Each structure stands twice: as C-alpha cells, then as structure tokens.
Image (cartoon, grey):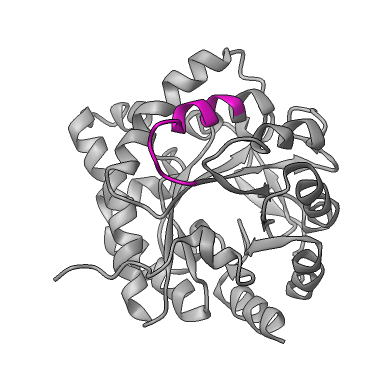
C-alpha cells in the first residue's frame, strides 16, 4: 500500500503559520526502554529495533507534531563500518530512517512532513565534538564526508533535509555545498552558546551563509539552552530573511564523561508564542523534550 505524503510542500505550509516539530528522539526511545549507551546512539536501532523508532515517531505525531525528524543524526557510513556493515547495508539503513518516519505519519489524517536528519561530523565521533566544532578538517573534507549520506537520504525522498546541531560555520558551508544539486529543500540549524556558535563564531556571521542559498527554506538553532533561543530567533529572522526554525533542548547540561544529563529542565512551551512573533515558523524541541511538552507546545500555539 502506498504511504501517504503531504499534499503541499513544507515551504508552502510555513507561509500559513507555524508548524510544530517533534521533540527529542533519544529521550523517547529511552522512555520506551531502549538502551542508547552504544556509540551509534539511536542510529543502532535502525538495524536492531526499527519498530522502536517507529513507535517513538508515532508518539510525537499523536502529541501533535507535524514534522518528524528521522533517526539519521548519528547514522554514517563510517560509524556503521566500525560495526562491520558495508556501504549497501548502510545506505539501506539511512533510507529506512526516512521510511520509518513516513510510516509513523500514517497515525493521523493530517499532513505530516519528514525531515531527514543530517547530523554534524562530531556526532560520528561520539565524543561530544558536536558541541565544540573545529575538527581540524577543511570545508572540502567535511563536504566529502557529508555528501554520500545526503545522497542516500535523498534517495528515500524526504520532504526536507534537517542540517542540524551544526557547531561551526565551516561545517555549515560544507553542508550547504553538499546538498547542492539534490533538489531537496533544507533547513540549517546551529547549536549555540549565547549569541555564538559552539565554535565561537558570531551567530550573525554563521547564519549569513543561509541567506542566499536557494534550497534553504528555514534557518535557526537547535539543541541549545531555551533561554538562548529567544535572541537567536530574532537574529535569524533579521539576517536570513527566511522563516526561522527553533528547537532547543530541555535546558539540562550534557556531561560528556558520565554520558548523562545534569540539572533541571528550563524548556517552557509558552516561550513559543514569542518565538512565533519574532519569525519562527518551525518550532519544537530537541534533547529531553518529550511528547507531553510537544502537546503543550501545540496548545500554546493554537491559543
């Protein structure tokens, strides 16, 4: 049976008002009892327990999310090769990530778009490098790393590519080069600290890369402190002239050594009303933001 796809492109839907993204996939998988201690993180379940990934996506659709971000964040040819998987097997798993989200979208009659996650190079290293950037690689080297999996993901026909949790303007440049010619729209979102990328570049400078790129339908930030998102939305709207994407994490701090989150949540769904007023059109949550918070986010935006 053919899988339902949205009647209108996501870019067109953004012109009609805000669209709610899902929340953190990893925390929902953990709540379902999945072990994510592996270096492949949630990507391991693409091979070992795909039904768990589909169930997590379904939880967000039922909470009201209308964009599902796939489990491809940490899925790379290099990462799976360390587990003995060949290129054909990895390509199949990358495409499966899109298919699982598409299947979960069937849980509701409304349009639900699928965003294929393209995580940063640091996610493959699995050592917290995505929160530092500056890997010691050139833009061209990073482009060569990203291009093969982007091409594989595009083969599964996602609605958009989520170039997400980007810590460094150099990597953003590489990603934007890598998507050229694919014909798939993208959003670009940086992980930040204050008003700078994790690598320390001014956010204005980093976001300027998206301003004139035809495939970019939205730009902004994700996996950051919710309090930093307030000003970031304003900067993104001013610099890019595009719809803004914003999906911060729960506000806890990631402890790289202990591989766990510290502190309490500061994610407040009522903030979304201010983000919308400032230009945000794709609004959701990242790590530690679950279906209950997404459901509240939907209520806030409808109210």
The location of residue 197, given as percent across then percent down, is 75, 35
The location of residue 295, given as percent across then percent down, is 59, 80
Q: Is residue 262 above or below residue 21?
A: above
Q: How many marks?
A: 0
- Name the quarter where the C terminus is drawn: bottom right
Which residue is pictured at 51% across the width and 33% down the height?
126
Q: Nearer the viewer, residue 52 or 205?
A: 205
Q: Is residue 239 left or right of residue 242?
A: right
| Residue at the extreme left | 1
| Residue at the extreme bottom | 303
Q: Quadrant of residue 32?
A: bottom left
Which residue is pictured at 40% across the width and 55% down the height?
159
- Name the quarter where the N terminus is drawn: bottom left
Q: Is residue 287 above or below residue 81?
A: below
Which residue is pictured at 79% across the width and 28% down the height?
201
Q: Is residue 270 left or right of residue 113?
A: right
Q: Is residue 192 above or below residue 201?
A: below
Region of the chain picked out in magenta, as a range? 173-185
Q: Is residue 254 above or below residue 133?
A: below
Q: Is residue 31 visible?
A: yes
Q: Does the stretch in magenta take in 154? A: no
The location of residue 109, given as percent across then percent down, is 36, 82
The location of residue 267, given as percent across then percent down, is 74, 66
Q: Is residue 266 visible?
A: no
Q: Is residue 226 left or right of residue 130?
A: right
């Amino acid at each position: 049976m053919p899988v339902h796809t949205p009647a209108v492109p996501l870019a067109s839907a953004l012109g009609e008002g805000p669209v709610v993204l899902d929340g953190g996939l990893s925390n929902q998988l953990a709540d379902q009892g999945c072990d994510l201690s592996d270096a492949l993180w949630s990507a391991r379940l693409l091979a070992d327990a795909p039904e768990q990934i589909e169930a997590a996506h379904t939880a967000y659709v039922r909470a009201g999310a209308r964009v599902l971000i796939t489990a491809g964040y940490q899925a790379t040819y290099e990462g799976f090769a360390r587990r003995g998987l060949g290129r054909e097997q990895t390509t199949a798993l990358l495409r499966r990530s899109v298919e699982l989200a598409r299947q979960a979208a069937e849980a509701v009659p409304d349009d639900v778009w699928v965003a294929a996650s393209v995580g940063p190079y640091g996610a493959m290293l699995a050592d917290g490098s995505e929160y530092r950037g500056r890997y010691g690689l050139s833009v061209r080297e990073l482009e060569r790393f990203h291009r093969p999996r982007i091409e594989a993901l595009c083969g599964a026909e996602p609605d958009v590519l989520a170039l997400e949790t980007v810590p460094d303007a150099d990597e953003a440049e590489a990603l934007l080069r890598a998507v050229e010619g694919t014909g798939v729209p993208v959003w670009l979102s940086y992980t930040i600290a204050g008003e700078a990328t994790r690598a320390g570049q001014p956010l204005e400078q980093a976001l300027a890369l998206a301003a004139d790129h035809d495939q970019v339908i939205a730009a902004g930030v994700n996996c950051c402190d919710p309090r930093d998102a307030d000003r970031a939305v304003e900067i993104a709207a001013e610099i890019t002239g595009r719809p803004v994407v914003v999906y911060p994490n729960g506000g806890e701090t990631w402890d790289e050594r202990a591989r766990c989150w510290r502190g309490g949540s500061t994610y407040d769904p009522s903030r979304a009303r201010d983000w919308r007023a400032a230009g945000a059109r794709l609004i959701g949550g990242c790590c530690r933001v679950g279906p209950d918070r997404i459901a509240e986010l939907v209520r806030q935006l409808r109210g």
